[in-house]
Each structure stands twice: as structure tokens, then as C-alpha cells.
Image (cartoon, rainbow, N blue to C red):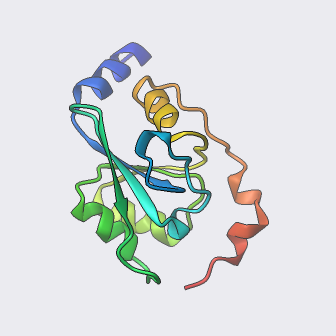
Amino acid sequence: MTATDLNMEKESRSMKIAIPSTDDRGFDSQVEQHFGRARYYTIVNTEDMSAKSVPVPFENHGPGDIPNFLKEHGANVIIAYGMGGKAVQFFDDMGIEVITGAMGRVGDVVDAYMKAKLAVDSNWKDDPGFGEHKH
């Protein structure tokens, strides 16, 4: 299968992409640095390319709370900057694709992902803030 075939497959497949966001501006929001600290998630429906901003319903969360919350919203993919290993495992167990190292404007990230051109920061784990994550 070529990259073009993969891109066409991605474009034809209806899915919901969840992105931790800095605010409730949808496509105009920025990707939140740590998915577990986001107060909002932008949920993008690729069928009609609509975006809705969903506030996180809890102030504090335990392991699995956010993955379950996003699954309830129909997420098939989560695109984030940083994420801990336990969260990745929860998403994997639910069959939700995880992409880390993404940054920038949500609309630009989704567009790049849909075109199979999403560039990610593979060094995000080197940020000292990610070593301090606790529940």
C-alpha cells in the first residue's frame, strides 16, 4: 500500500479525533501540552469536518478517567503532545489510536493528520515536566 493509498483510506474513513485543547475555540485552539491537564477537548468528526469543544467534567481525575470520557464521546484517535505510559495503555486497550508529540493550532494538526503529513516532536518526553506526573 502506498502513502497515497493510506491517505485516501484515512480520508474515506469516518472517525472522531480528540485533541486536548487550551481553550474552547475548537479548530482555533492550541494543543494542550499535557493531555491530562487539559480543561477542554476538541472532538473532530471527520465525516463532515465539524469540531466541538467539550469541557472536561471533572476537576481531578484518576487513571482511566479521561480515556473513558473520550471513548464516551466516540473518539477513535487521540492526538496529543505529551501523555504518560498508563494513559497510552488505557487508550490502546480501548482500541483508540494514540499519536503524541503534536503541537500547534488544532485545525492545522487535524489537517496535517488527515493528509498523512503530521510532523511530531519525538523529543517531547525529554521535557522535565512530564517526569513529574502523579495521580
Depth order, front residue of 51/74: 51
> Quadrant of the image for the C terminus?
bottom right
Quick check: 111 left or right of 16? right
In the image, residue 118 above or below residue 37? above
Quadrant of the rendered structure where residue 46 is? top left
Q: Quadrant of residue 104?
A: top right
Residue at 78%, 67% in the rendered image: 128
Measured as percent of width and height from the top left, residue 127 is found at 76, 60
Instruction: Please name the residue shown 55% across and 39% down the image.
Output: 105
Q: Is residue 135 above or below residue 11?
A: below
Residue 27 percent coordinates (x, y):
44, 39
For image coordinates 61% across by 39% down, the residue present is 120
Which quadrant would the N terminus be assigned to in this image?
A: top left
The count of marks equals: 0
Front-most of 102 and 123? 102
For the point 54% across and 56% down, which residue is it? 22
Residue 97 % position (x, y): 38, 49
Looking at the image, the residue that sits furthest to the front is: 25
Residue 112 point in image, percent of width and height: 49, 28
